Image (tube, grey):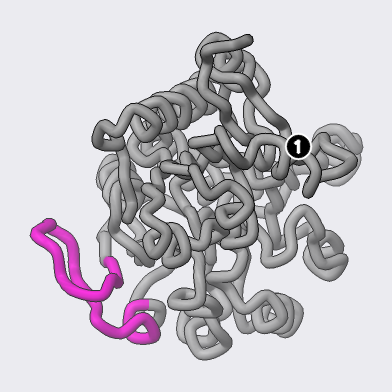
Amino acid sequence: MSTKPDLLVVSPWYSAAMAELDAHFTVHKLWEADDKAGLLASIADRCEAIAGSSVCGADIMDALPRAKVIAHHGVGYDGVDVKAATERGIKVSNTPDVLSDEVADFALGLLLATCRRIPQADRYVRAGRWESDGDMPFTKRVHGRKVGILGLGRIGIEIARRCEAFKMDIAYHTRGPKDVPYTYYGDLVSMARDVDFLIAIVPGGAGTRHMVNRQVLDALGPEGVLVNVARGSVVDEAALIEALKEGRLGAAGLDVFDKEPKVPQALKDMTENVVLQPHQASATHDTRLAMGRLVMENALAGIAGKPLITRVN
């Protein structure tokens, strides 16, 4: 009989990192089970750790009464019922820091791709239009502009540092001012009105749902650019589509969507002023391996009764 502790994995993540779990745990993969209730019942008396990259609700916790820790794969943990976990004495962790630089790099890349129309230019060359139609229309400058960052946590700070390298005038909106050399706005609409670019990097959840609404988009204006590397729920998608269609917003670079992987057809059809990505801001081999290892280390710590490395409750 195995002496390794039992770990329930609710949903998968990077396969190379998951493969390392087998050296430390007896792994049970809930998403592969035909009889999920049966699997939970079979390990209910011994499973002390839960891990995953998506939803973990009170139902799973109640099915595993010996659970001590939920090790979530990702910075945002809005899919985990943290309140229910806390009430049951279950520690919850996430994977911050190890992906901050990766997401910040991607945010600037997405801003460049959107403003300088890099995907459109690629298609222009491939279609032979450079030869037939001549030079492509000019694009929007990025350096030296004013950028507003919605959320100034670990990733937001790294985005700001990269914007400094682009000689940008940096503003930010959070619940309160921070000790940083950037301009604080207590009102998001006011900040949107004053900036050229708005980059969203706040957590998901009820408290931030549709923070970027019609009023914010209208304040950003017909020359403004929205970049979302936060959660799809942060932006009112219907209002965004209307603003883009009607020319009330200039362009958008989107890595996340409200009902991903489903993306509204209207956004897919906007090939000239919208750049779409499949939620891949942190999706490099290096970072996903580091995230997976942090999940594993948190799970091991929780089982052993030690402090979690990145506890959230």
Mark 1 is surrounded, within 10 Å at the Cα level, by few (under 14), some (14 to 19) or many (20 or more) other residues, namely few
Q: Is residue 132 above or below residue 217?
A: above
Q: Which of 46 and 56 is in front in this view?
A: 46
**Type of residue at label 1?**
Asp
User: Would you say residue 279 is visible in this rendering?
Assistant: yes
Q: What element carries label 1?
A: helix
Q: Where is residue 184? Give x, y as percent.
A: 20, 72
Q: Is residue 33 above or below residue 287?
A: below
Locate the C terminus and report the quarter of the image it occupies. bottom left
Answer with the quarter of the image where residue 311 lies: top left
Tell me the quadrant of the picture where the N terminus can be found: top right
Whether residue 213 is situated above or below residue 162 in the rendered picture: below
**Can you give x and y, in whole percent of width and height, for residue 113 in the image?**
59, 46
At 50% across and 36% down in the image, what residue appears? 49
The magenta segment: 172-191
Q: Is the magenta stretch mostly helix, strand or loop?
A: loop
Horizontally, residue 4 falls left or right of residue 55, namely left
Q: Is residue 71 magenta?
A: no
Residue at the spot 26% in from the left edge and 31% down from the top edge:
306
Please give the name of the residue rendered at 36% of the width and 54% of the height, measured from the top-left corner.
89
* Residue at image mark 1: 122
